[in-house]
Image (tube, rainbow, N blue to C red):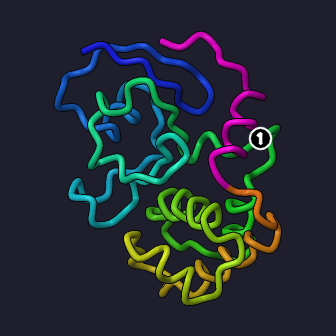
Amino acid sequence: MRITVTVDGTKFADDVEPRQLLVHYLRERLGKVGTVVGCDTSNCGACTVHLDGHSVKSCSVLAVQADGSEVTTVEGLARDGKLHPVQQAFHDNHALQCGFCTPGMIMQSIDLLADNPDPDEQAVRHGLEGNLCRCTGYQNIVRAVRDAAARMQGGAGPEAERVAGAELGAGGGQ
């Protein structure tokens, strides 16, 4: 099936198998390897991306379901060589160890902050429930999300991604 999708500000048109998962399309066809395949069962959240501004586990979405949509991956967050505030907060608060879950945690955190720009610790833990980390014990992740909230003061979400994506310019996709 033919799909057209905008990924990290660039429009792509491709033929895909009807059963191909979005995570595999992003990784194998577009080279977006920051979107991690963790479990293929939607349990871990490592593959979380934004689909039209909301987090989804890309191992539970077919590529054809993204037709006509905007997808933002962890690779699409940095602007002008500067990390997104959530990425920077994860770095500054040592919110990773092996880093495997980090892309999905960051994408889910941005969605969480779009819905709740000033979450307390309990709200952060609840908002990240579907994303698993096997290394950190979550304390530094919670601290990073709260730090990012303070840095952004309500500036997360799909509109921020759309504006930032427009700055990239929609180049010549595939």
Screen quadrant of the N terminus: top left
Percent across and percent down for residue 101 are 45, 64
Q: Position of residue 152 (x, y in %)?
A: 80, 64
What residue is drawn where x is 23% and y is 53%?
40
Identify the magenta region: 157-174
Q: Residues within 10 Å of mark 1 (few under 14, many from 20)?
A: few
Camera-side residue of 39 and 151: 151
Whether 51 is drawn above or below 12: the answer is below
Is 101 displayed left or right of 59 in the figure? Answer: right
Q: Which residue is mark 1?
A: 79
| 4 vs 53: above or below | above
Q: Quadrant of residue 18?
A: top left
Residue lying at 48% horizontally and 87% vertically, measured from the top left: 137
- In the rendered structure, the answer to whether residue 133 lies left or right of residue 83 reads left
Q: Residue furthest front?
A: 115
Majority SS type along the magenta span: helix
Image coordinates for residue 20, horizontal then vertical, percent: 22, 32
**40 over 132 or under it: above or below:** above
Residue drawn at (59%, 33%), measured in percent from left and top? 8
- The quarter of the displayed image where residue 92 is located: bottom right
Count of all numbered marks drawn on residues in the image:
1
Write the residue at 65% across / 86% down.
120
> Which picture quadrant has residue 156?
bottom right
Q: Secondary structure at mark 1?
A: loop
Q: Amino acid at mark 1?
A: Arg
In the figure, 159 relative to 39: above or below?
above
Q: Is residue 169 magenta?
A: yes
- Left or right: 42 in relation to 158: left
